[in-house]
Amino acid sequence: MTARQFHLEDLNPDDVEIVVANGTPRYRREIFDRAASRGFKFRTLIDPSASISPTSKIGRGVLIFQNVIVSSNAVIGDNAAIQQSTVIGHDDSIGKNCVFGLNAVLSGNVSIGDESFIGVNASIREKISIGSRVIIGMGSVVIRSIENDLVAVGNPARVIRKNIDGKIF
């Protein structure tokens, strides 16, 4: 028995809700936009072990995995994926289509633009701004703001190149 592949064209938007399961922010956006243009609805999935402040705002199609903490007044944009044990601090703002690796930690009042990727065990100091389409490497410690379309790694995180193609893996 083989699994049947489904394409958006095969489905009725009134019969299903979509969750995007892809770890590259650019591809998450492309899939989300394609489904949205065809009238599909998006399901937000939050693991029961996650701790979500009632004053936070969570967008459409967001995935929040086990043991994630989302603190007060945090805002998470549509189609973001927040992996296990990540901490989103108070008053943080996460853009659309962002992806967070395991154990990422954002202090308070951090702003992250659309389609950014925060690697496993990365830490971001309070009051930092990360632009759109930024890649923060695993284990990086971000102590300065980072502009759009850059890749930063290390402790402290340093920009190593432009993010030209938007691919993570």
Image (tube, rainbow, N blue to C red):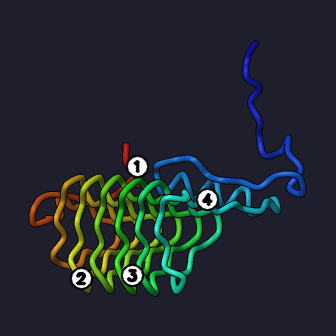
What number is the disc on residue 92? 3
Which residue: 24% across, 60% down?
122
Among the two numbered marks 2 and 3 on one chain, the one whose residue lies closer to the N terminus: 3
Q: Which residue is mark 4?
A: 45
Q: Within the image, what quadrant is residue 38 found in?
A: bottom right
The disc at residue 167 is 1
Q: Position of residue 118 (x, y in %)?
A: 33, 60
Residue at 16 percent across and 65 percent down: it is 141
Dot 4 or dot 1: first in sequence order is 4
Tell me which numbered mark, 4 or 3, is placed earlier along the sequence: 4
User: Gap in Å between the C-alphas at discs 2 and 3?
Assistant: 9 Å
Q: Which residue is mark 2?
A: 126
Q: Amino acid at mark 4?
A: Leu
Residue 37 on image: x %, y %: 77, 63
In front: 124, or 8?
124
Residue 155 is drawn in which quadrant?
A: bottom left
Q: Amino acid at mark 2?
A: Glu
Foreground label between 4 and 2: 4
Disc 2 to disc 1, C-alpha distance: 27 Å
